[in-house]
Amino acid sequence: MAEPDAPRLAWGLTGSGHYLRESLALIETLPDVDIFLTRAGAEVLSMYGIPLKSLRERHRVFQDHTASSVPVGFLYSGHYHTLVIGPATSNTVAKCVAGISDTLVTNLYAQAGKCRIPSIVFACDTEPTTVTEAPDRMVTLYPRPVDLENTRRLAGFPDTTVAETVDDLKAAIERRLACLNTSSS
């Protein structure tokens, strides 16, 4: 990939449908976003009737096709100023907390931390009860205590902001972009 004119936003999609449509709508309002898609993320897009082709028409999309997560190397050369993971499954959050980087998105999170690139994680499991969209209906979920604890723990990590709602996610991205605009002036 050619060096971008200016650093971009990297957005990781994992295997969650929780506020998936809202997250994709938010991506469409932002400039210069590249999407990093786990295998589970690709499956969920299909389950929710969202064609991968439609994302590729507007964004660079990197998929989890390599054992070593080759696209992660773009973090080392200044391609990205911020990593957003959203929606982030409880599995992804747990792996980030435990330091496990075995998917494209968890590897991005680990390497962003090592490069001191700020991350914003839109965690799915933030409340004891959640009503969310499944592919064919609305469902009520009851996150396990370990899921809620991992979300809380992740919020304490350096250079990591955990967003608990769509509004929190929008505000965190706006703050980050404002910070970048201020520091480049």
Image: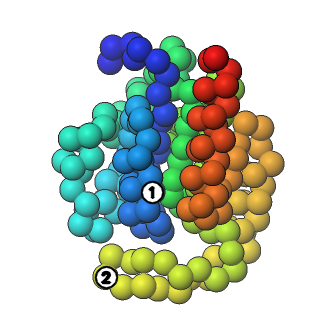
- Mark 2 and mark 1 in contact? Answer it, CB < 8 Å: no
Identified by mark 2, the residue type is: Asp
> Is residue 172 in view from this perspective?
yes
Q: How is the image coloured?
A: rainbow
Residue at numbered disc 1: 23
Numbered mark located on residue 174 in the image: none
Above or below: residue 75 compared with residue 163: above
Above or below: residue 46 compared with residue 176: below
> Is residue 73 in view from this perspective?
no
Residue lying at 69% horizontally and 80% vertically, measured from the top left: 128
Instruction: Return the x and y of residue 5 as percentages of the image width and height.
Output: 41, 14
Count of number-bearing discs: 2
Quick one: quadrant of the N terminus? top left
Residue at numbered disc 2: 136
Instruction: Return the x and y of residue 103 as percentages of the image width and height.
Output: 47, 43
Say few, some or many: other residues with alpha carbon within 10 Å of mark 1 (under 14 / 14 to 19 / 20 or more). Answer: many
Residue lying at 39% horizontally and 56% vertically, measured from the top left: 25
Q: Residue furthest right?
A: 156
125 relative position to 36: left or right? right
Of 183 and 12, which appears nearest the observer?
A: 183
Quadrant of the image occupied by residue 101: top right
Task: Label 1: state its secondary structure.
Answer: helix
